[in-house]
Image (spheres, helix red, strand yellow):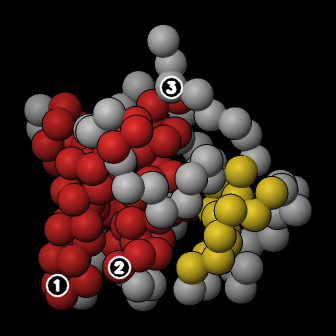
Amino acid sequence: MKLAWILWLASILPPQAADSLCLSTTLYLEARDQSVLGQHAVAEVALRRTDSGLWGDSVCDVVTARKQFAPTIVSPRTRLTNTEAWSQSVTIALEAQRNWALPAGERKEVVPGASHFLAHAIASPSWRNAYQVATIGDHTFLRVQNLKPKS
C-alpha cells in the first residue's frame, strides 16, 4: 500500500474509521521497529494532541499537520510493505483509542504529559532540550507544551 492511497482512503471514510487508519499509519511509519510500549507512547502523543485541538480536531488532522508526524515528512510514494508490522500497528492504534476514550483518571498513560517525541538518530529539533518524560527504545518523549483538552 502506498501512503498517498492510505491518506486518500482516510479522507473518504467516516471520521472514527479514518482516525483509526491515520493513527495506524502513523504508528507504522514512526514506530514499527519499536516495542509495543513505544508504539503506545507514540499513539498517546497523537491522541493528547488531538484532545488539545492545537493541531486539528481529528487524529487525521493532527498526524497530517505540516511537519509534525511521518505522514507529512516521508514521501507520499512510500510503500507500507511489512504486513506483520501493519497488523500490529492497527491493533495498537485501536487499543490506544479505546484507552484514550476512557475518562482521564482511568486511562493508562505511558508518557504522561508528553506533547512531542523524537528519534535522536534522525532528528534534532529546537525543542529537544524540553522536559523529558521518558525514553522508550529509540524515542525520547518530551513535554514541550502543557496540553490541555479543548473545552
Pair 2/1: label in front? 2
How packed mark 3 is, by other alpha carbons closer than 10 Å (few <14, some 14-19, many 20 or more), is: few
Residue topped by disc 1: 83
**Residue at image x 16%, y 76%?**
87
Amino acid type, residue under disc 1 in the picture: Thr
x and y, in percent, of residue 17 in the image: 14, 43
**Residue at image x 48%, y 63%?**
110
State the residue lying farthest toward the top.
Answer: 151
Location of residue 102 by image quarter: top left
x and y, in percent, of residue 54 in the image: 58, 27
Nearest to N terminus: mark 3 or mark 2: 2
Residue topped by disc 3: 149
Marks 1 and 3, how far apart at CA: 34 Å
How packed mark 1 is, by other alpha carbons closer than 10 Å (few <14, some 14-19, many 20 or more), is: few
Location of residue 108 by image quarter: bottom left
Nearest to N terminus: mark 2 or mark 1: 2
**Residue at image x 61%, y 47%?**
113
Amino acid type, residue under disc 3 in the picture: Pro
Q: Is there a contact, CB below 8 Å, between mark 3 and mark 2?
A: no
Q: Residue 36, labelled with which disc?
A: 2
Amino acid type, residue under disc 2 in the picture: Val
In the rendered image, is residue 147 in sight? Answer: yes
Q: Nearer the viewer, residue 11 or 93?
A: 93
**Residue at image x 40%, y 36%?**
104
Q: Is residue 21 left or right of residue 43?
A: left
